[in-house]
Image: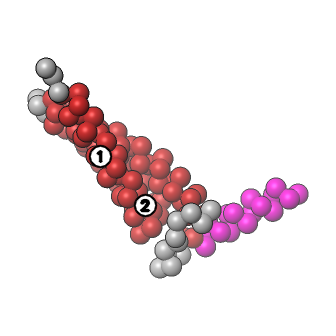
Amino acid sequence: MNILGIVIAVITFWVIGLFHPIVIKAEYYFGVKCWWVFALAGALFLTLSVFVEDIIVSSALGVIGCSSFWSILEIFEQRKRVEKGWFPKNPNRNDYKNLEDTSLEKNDKRKK
């Protein structure tokens, strides 16, 4: 019996669950300007996964790498969710003012 697929599936499930709050917190504290950190992490983890011989560790590193790349998209989506009021804005950050100005401009263009 081979349980390797189940082990990798559980690791994948765990990593995806872990990245969800990471994206929320990263957007809250740093905004979308931290996307490059996810890109570097993704490249690093995918590169490491190529050189690790253990299949479970290699798979876990690959899943973390791909999740990091996916988080780039999600951090921009999280910004939109904040704009819609689904998540709180960080009152200590000023870039929301630009976000609100952009939203107002979009609404003005739609009205015309």
Residue interval drawn in magenta = 97-112
> Among all residues in the image, which is located at the extreme left?
53
Q: Quadrant of residue 30?
A: bottom left
| Direction from residue 9 to residue 105 in the image, left or right | right
**Up-down: is 42 above or below 112?**
above
Tell me residue 98's x, y (percent).
61, 69
Q: Residue furthest front?
A: 1
Q: Is residue 75 above or below residue 66?
A: below
Mark 1 residue crowding within 10 angstroms, few (<14) / some (14–19) / many (20+): some
- Residue at (62% x, 62% y) in the render: 84
Residue 53, image x, y percentages: 11, 29
Is residue 40 at all visible to an observer of this figure? no
Callout 1: helix, strand or loop? helix
Q: CA distance from mark 2 to mark 1?
A: 15 Å
Residue position marked by numbered label 1 in the rendering: 15
- Label 2 belongs to which residue? 24
Q: Position of residue 11 (x, y in %)?
A: 24, 40
Amino acid type for the residue under numbered disc 2: Ile
Q: Give residue 62's position: percent from left, percent from top.
A: 26, 36
Whether tag 2 and tag 1 are in contact, CB under 8 A, the answer is: no
Image point 43% across, 60% down: which residue?
24
Q: Secondary structure at mark 2?
A: helix
Q: Pick out the residue farthest to the top.
A: 1
Residue flagged by tag 1: what amino acid is it?
Answer: Val
- Is 99 contained in the magenta span? yes
- Determine the main secondary structure of the stretch shown in magenta: helix
Q: Residue at x 34, y 46 (%)?
A: 16
Say left or right for 69 vs 77: left
Q: Earlier in the sequence, mark 2 or mark 1?
A: 1
Left or right: 40 in relation to 110: left
